[in-house]
Image: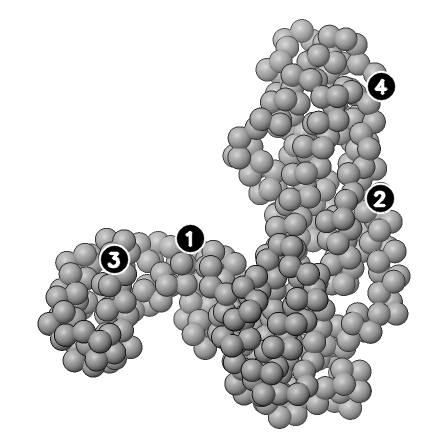
Amino acid sequence: MRPSPEVADLIRTGVQIVLDAPAEWLKQVDSAVLGGAGMDVITSDPTLLEVALRINEGNLRHWATANAADPGARVPVNVGAEAETYIRDLARRGLDAGSLDSFRTAQNVAWHLWMEICFALTDDPVVLRELLQVTSASIATFVDDTVKRLAELIDAARAELAGDTHAQRRVAVALVLEGAPISRERAESQLRYRLDGPHTAVILSGDTGIAHDELEVACEALMEASEVTRRLTVVAGAAELWVWLPTATVATDAALERHPGIRMAVGSSGVDLDGFRRSHFEALSVRGVIARVGSSRRIAHFDDLRLVTLLGEDPSAADEFVETTLGDLRNADDHVLTCVRTWFASGCNAAETAVKLYTHRNTVVRRLARADALLPVPLSVNALHVAVALDLLEWRT
């Protein structure tokens, strides 16, 4: 449906408002997408979620830009390399075209926001009716065309992965993790990995733009530093690997020295099938907590995050706990915060703290007194809560 000249001008004005929209406007679309049906798998993966939101925003701007150039004309599908990679990642996770519902959710929210713009552009009922009819058809057609194209891509990717050994391995791993009735012999045969003995699970993920090959190189470095010669690896996405190493200790620091764009979430070591499962779920939990609290840490171990993992399930509650417990101590300088943390780690012994910090005991005492002055409740009566809050605060940096 081609618009009249008057409506075409209004469309150009409206889409410019969209292109100049503040961040809060886009956050409404993102928020609705996150709550869409079937988004749990996507929201649990920070890398996948980042790409999904970026694609949705890109589609919104693509539609607006096309209508600025040719109001009301059919907008061509905007499927680039990033969208194709995203679709392959969905297929690797066993998802089908139903996982594309986020695009419909984004359409509904964007339409309501667009109507608000339209009602502000004109109060002429005839012109307004045409404006809404033309743009409604344009948006619906664009989203329909986009979802259809992506559905074709995801079906093709699923067919391709049907013969992919990585996909088959992931299915076998999923059965083991779910506790399905798969025999140990069959699982070990499909995985080519022994399930007895020790296991430590690691999730390697890359920043935007990190190639899959670099993840593999980092994984090899992790094996070498940990002195193991075999591993089980599942490709969980273009920028994520699930790894199990047959060892109780992993040398993550040494492995990441030459790979600054890669992060590692590490579960505690375990033994046999139960340890295999538990270590991986712990690594997943660590990855999720790190994403929720917005930590910049590249390496995170479950053993260091046990308490934070328990409290990090509700970010707002955790934030409130840190704020009410620490008060002004949250913003103290690093010397004071480090001193208090070291004091706790030293069994609340000032002399031992001084040794660990290579400073004088009197300096430790002064810094502890400074911390006491900043706290809403003194250390002497609230030490446990302060220690927990400091742990939470540390993982938010």
Q: Please, what is the three-letter code of the amino acid marked with disc 1? A: Ser
Q: Nearer the N terminus, badge 3 or badge 2? A: 2
Q: Nearer the N terminus, badge 1 or badge 3? A: 1
Q: CA distance from mark 3 to mark 4?
A: 63 Å
- Label 3 vs label 4, nearer the camera: 3
Q: CA distance from mark 1 to mark 3?
A: 24 Å
Instruction: Bin the neighbour count of mark 4 within 10 Å (Cα to Cα): few under 14, some 14-19, many 20 and up.
Output: few
Which residue appears at 46% of the width and 68% of the height? Answer: 309
Which residue appears at 78% of the width and 57% of the height? Answer: 88
Image position of 367 (left or right of 47): left
Residue 300 or 257: which is nearer the viewer? 257
Instruction: Bin the neighbour count of mark 3 within 10 Å (Cα to Cα): few under 14, some 14-19, many 20 and up.
Output: few
Which residue was labeled with disc 1? 316
Q: Nearer the N terminus, badge 1 or badge 2? A: 2
Query: Could you tell me which secondary element the residue under label 2 belongs to?
Result: helix
Provide residue 33's location: percent of width, then percent of height.
Answer: 64, 44
Q: Nearer the N terminus, badge 2 or badge 4? A: 4
Which residue was labeled with disc 2? 149
Q: Please, what is the three-letter code of the amino acid marked with disc 4? A: Met
- Label 3 vs label 2, nearer the camera: 3
Q: Quadrant of residue 321?
A: bottom left
Which residue was labeled with disc 4? 1
Image position of 178 (left or right of 380): right
Residue 217 or 26: which is nearer the viewer? 217
Query: Could you tell me which secondary element the residue under label 4 belongs to?
Result: loop
Q: Please, what is the three-letter code of the amino acid marked with disc 3? A: Asp
